[in-house]
Amino acid sequence: MSDTFGISGNEFCLNGKPFKIYSGAMHYFRTLPEYWEDRLLKLKLAGFNTVETYVCWNLHEPEKGKFDFDGMLDIVRFLETAKKLGLYAIVRPGPYICAEWEFGGFPAWLLSDKNIELRCYNEIYLRHVREYFEKLFALLKPHFITNGGNIIAMQIENEYGSYGNDKKYLNALKDMYGELGVDVIMFTSDGTWCNMLSGGTIDGILPTLNFGSRASSAFSALKPFGDVPKMCMEFWCGWFDHWGEKHHTRGAESTLKEIEEFLRQGASFNMYMFHGGTNFGFNAGSNHNKGFAPTVTSYDYCAPLTEWGDYTETYHKIRKLLCEKQGIEMTELPPSPVMQSIGKVALTESADLFENLDRISQKHYSPLPRGMEAYGQSHGLIYYKTKIKGKYSASFLTIDDVHDYAHVYFDKKKIAVIDRMKKKSFFAKLKLKKQLFVSVSEESELGILVDAMGRVNYGDDIYDRKGISRVMLANQTIMDYTVHTIPLDNLENLEFKKLSDNENKNGPVFLKGYFEADGKDCFVNMKGFTKGYVFVNGFNLGRYWNIGPQKALYLPGALLKKNNEIVIFEMEKYGSCDVTIQAEPALG
């Protein structure tokens, strides 16, 4: 491609001619690189001309000053693949992206400094943003359309009007973009409510809209901005799922109706999502509206392409519409993915978490418990342990700010589970206080194991430090902790033993098995297990939880070899000593 792209009045223009953006969202960091070309080709063959992606700061700079743009994070390879297929690109680098992604894309280490105020004109925060952008934009710049690449537009921040109104901050980002060589179209995106647009837009930057319905009237929100192109930067074709809620679906006809309206109005749009992919590892975020609500591992989103890259009814209907609109011949599509069913895999070895603490954790000493970020930890588990010495009459033991799911141990016996998701009814509080009514005669050991369920990615609660903040026995603050940070990012040092017939089947425990496979995709069905994580050949597939709606984790065939290892970390209890690997997803 060697094109020019710009805006003339209320039209986008490509090489001086009016151009409509028909874009589909696909995040490179939610799909293995082995599948990028397949998914992007299916986007192109459905009549789309552009791919849109966010950029995830948290994975690109997991530690301050240590950057990663390789493998699954090779955004340059992703852009080059799109260009090879004839697709333009829209890039949304944040620094905040929401995206139902861990901490909205922010790296957890930002929370270690309580002087940092996020998403505003805070000089410390902006210095970190600039240092990250300098690395990222140096990679992106050769791929701007002005330099012969395929990036036609870059977003400033993300839905900022849903959060704040700091125009000094937004203009600082705008100036930063210019200083770092961004010379393609810059835009903001916000909801259609006037309050959101008032807070999130800035002079000289193209305003775009985000919505999932009523396209016939939604663009009226752009009238105060004069003669600008009609662009829906996020047309929500589906929705995401939280643990414990029902699975979201959307009919093909409903989606098609809105796209027909876009075409009738001569509007441009970006379908969010065209291919949703997967929140592998610890990367699913959380919301906090009426209460804490973590997002499931699948990011299928009811998109035209499924999580595993298969076609849906929506895909075929949209393809027909867009190809006919543009006079594109509908050539033969690539075949659907061939899935494999492996069946039951025996779990033959186990490793108790507490017996392996020193092998997979780092030890810290702390007078008061702090969030995991203060110890340099971004994700996983954290274990606080202390000794209470002397004589204490029966008293309430209270634990503040449990983020997010905790086991409480007293003299090595589990006495309570504290779940941040649970509604704090009066009766629930009474039950919890009864469980945490303890006494000490000489010396007792208190242990608190916390599982971080994904930082809040939207709204004012994004300052979501994981772990606990304080423990009290009656009115006395309990101090002097040994803290084990357990990021679960390397399980090679675990010491497994043969799983015995009389195993008590209680967590927290690691279970291991082996299986043979080929390179086809499949799903790990977690029936018989309660809550935890699944690792295949060292790769973290993500969280599972028996409260649903997701019952099986997607296992890409690209991760598989002839001989494979599966490790399950079970937090609670399990009722089966085998796991089923099947060809079908499981929701319910």
Image (spheres, grey):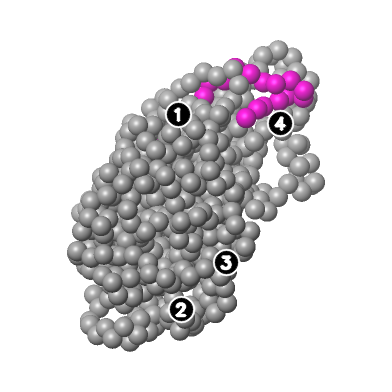
Q: Residue at x 43, y 48 (%)?
A: 174
The label nearer to you, 4 versus 3, is 3
Please provide the residue range marked out in magenta. 469-488
Q: Which element type, helix, strand or loop, lies under badge 3?
A: helix
User: Please, is residue 243 above or below residue 375 in the view?
Assistant: below
Residue linked to disc 4? 398
The label nearer to you, 1 versus 2, is 2
Instruction: Work out how far the residue at label 4 is from the one at label 3, CA to CA, in angstroms.
Output: 53 Å
Q: Amino acid at mark 4?
A: Thr
Q: Residue at x 53, y 35 (%)?
A: 122
Instruction: Work out how far the residue at label 1 is from the one at label 4, CA to CA, in angstroms.
Output: 26 Å
Residue 139 position, x and y percent, is 26, 46
Q: Residue 57's image quarter? A: top left
Q: Which element type, helix, strand or loop, lies under badge 1?
A: loop
Q: Amino acid at mark 3?
A: Pro
Considering depth in this image, is 402 or 285 the residue closer to the camera?
285
